[in-house]
Amino acid sequence: MSIITQELLEELFLLYSQNSVLKLHGDTLPIETEKLQRTCEHLFAIDYNLTLIDNNFQDILCQTYPPKLILTHTVSTIKEITKIHFGETEENIEEKERKTKNVKKNTKKGNQKTKKKEKQKRKKENNVVDERKNKKEKENEKDKKENQKEKEKEKEKEKEKKKKKKKKKEKGRERGKETKKKGNKTDTTKHQKSKKDKEQKKDPQTEKKEIKHPLFSTLLISRDARCRKRFPIEFCYVLNKSLCRSSTLSKGIELMFTGKKNPLKTLSGFVPHTSTRKKKKIRNKDPEIQLIQNGKKEILKEIKKNVENKKEKFNEGTIPEVRLVDIALMQKVWKIKYIVDLMVEIKKEKYKLIVSSSEKGDSYDRYSTFSVNSMPYPGVELFGEFQKNGYNGEGVIYDWDDPINTATLKIDPKLLKFPLLKKINFQNYRKWDIIKLTQNYMKVILTMVSDPRKNTGLDIHCLSGWDRTPLFCSLARMSLWADGLIHQSLSPLQFLYLVVGYDWLLFAHKLNDRVKNGYEIFHFCFYFLQFIQNDEFKLSNYQKKWDEFLLKRKKIKIKIKKQIKKQNIKNGTNKGKSKNKNDLNKKQILTKNGKNESRGKKCQKSESKKEKMKKNKKKKKSMENDISDEDTKSYNRRAEKLKELQTIFTKFYKKNVLSQFKN
């Protein structure tokens, strides 16, 4: 399975073109999906320690997700996350451990006292037991005599039964001889096989016990918060952060039909009239669900603060349980900060009903803790023009004047201060063609990925999550692979199999339907690789700029603090110090005198600094020449990898997909 030949790739493209969506769930899966799943698992396992979440364990998590979800975390990290990710912080866990240690010490002291009391009780009990033994021995002798008589009677009855069985067997043999003469033969072999099969099933060694993943119960609750139950799941793990994919948020109407609980409660605060009797609260024994229930209180406090700032009323009954778990899963488990919303609409309407909504359209600002970036990207229909234009994306512009396009481009203002994004004028995004639009969006995504701070994960989603999301997810994976950050040991042919099989096919992209209508977004993804070969999309450049950017911010903060202290000293409002004017004047005089004395020393140092600056410039020039040689080599490697990947794709796509639809 490690060696992927050209024949395997041909089979994959043929399978992809013939089936619009594979059967990804159920008790029995076809051989093709199982084979594809195993090969993808093996390709991931070459470079990573995997953990698998069974999608079909007792209940299907999502019908359009792979049968087994692949995570590149180690097993230990996932278990540690599940202990802390809802309700319990690290401080609370440490306090519990201290209490348990103190209880053990107290129990040791108490045990010594109890042992002395127990010895005294045992002596008294032993005297009573001796008297009881004598009585029981007499009673047992009587019982033995009675039991002997009963056994003799039972033996006589068994002899009579054996005689009756012999007579029945003799009659059965006579009947068997008669049937053989007539030709009706009895099959004794079938009965023997059935007994052997039963014995084999009962053996514990042959049975495979399915193990429940610790995140399974949380995903069961959070899946109803998203459209088509496509909850946020990790597709790549880079630089100690998880990159996730999902669909947009679902509204109350979809929850009404998909949720297991009372559907009317999931709507905006409406609860049906019920009896006034108080029902007993049933506690869930699942420890992870108990942690979720404890974690809701902390999340509710944050939501209340955001709502009270806007002077709006807050009712806990109006917020669905499912939405809170979705926030906790993104914030605590995957540690997401940035959300890339590719929807063109703020709220999706069907038959004049709001079916789904994005995080930017949440009325309660529940997702205000995240950095929500509205980056509207045109749907599949625009890629029909890409086909008509001879598979050329230059000059293909989307019609933004359509009334469906309610969303506008809004990127986090802190990100816009980043030096590589300052040059781009995002206000002119409606004039850009598809190539320039995707290029600039990829630059924004790469800045998010290269953020060196902690808890800065990323979630990409469009409406349903199977057309535009795989486009940007696979482009991010391919650019990181070309830089040598992920899947380092995979060849271009192996890596292409993984991208097409896992990112597109197993996550239910409808290729057959899209190619028939001429919406070739899948083809555009690999066609676009020629526009990412530049040095602008190399992640190491973004990492260097981040280091410079964060250093400048620290220096600016230090300057502002110094200025504030000086102003406080002048105004006499310096905290923790005397406010007498005489004391403040003394300090100011000392600082002035210190400056005057140090002027002569500074003049002497300035001459030596100039000499040092000249030497440093010469060193920098020599260093820059060495670095430039390394950059050109790495750039050439990146360009060669992406070119080779593009040529392999076009070869198999034209031969196995486009040729079938033309015929």
Image (cartoon, grey):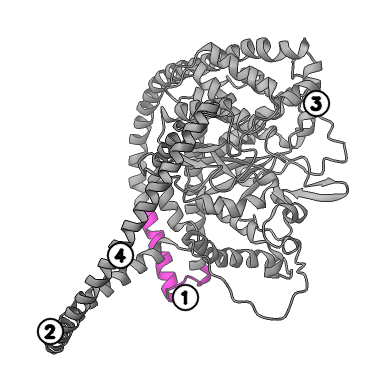
Q: Mark 2 or mark 3, which has the lower sequence index?
A: 2
Q: Mark 3 or mark 4, which has the lower sequence index?
A: 4
Horizontal and vertical percent position of residue 107: 23, 77
Q: Mark 1 or mark 4, which has the lower sequence index?
A: 4
Q: Is residue 203 left or right of residue 21?
A: left
**Which residue corresponds to mark 4?**
154
Under mark 3, the amino acid is Ile
Under mark 4, the amino acid is Glu
Categorize mark 4 by other alpha carbons within 10 Å: few (<14), some (14-19), many (20+). few
Under mark 2, the amino acid is Lys
Dominant secondary structure of the magenta stretch? helix
Under mark 1, the amino acid is Lys
Q: Where are the magenta residues, as a range?
A: 570-597
Q: Nearer the viewer, mark 2 or mark 4?
A: 4
For marks 1 and 2, give the CA distance: 80 Å
State which quarter of the image contains the C terminus. top right
Q: Nearer the viewer, mark 1 or mark 3?
A: 3
For marks 3 and 4, give the CA distance: 98 Å
Q: Nearer the viewer, mark 1 or mark 2?
A: 2
Q: Nearer the viewer, mark 1 or mark 4?
A: 4
**Which residue corresponds to mark 3?**
397
**Which residue corresponds to mark 1?**
581
Categorize mark 2 by other alpha carbons within 10 Å: few (<14), some (14-19), many (20+). few
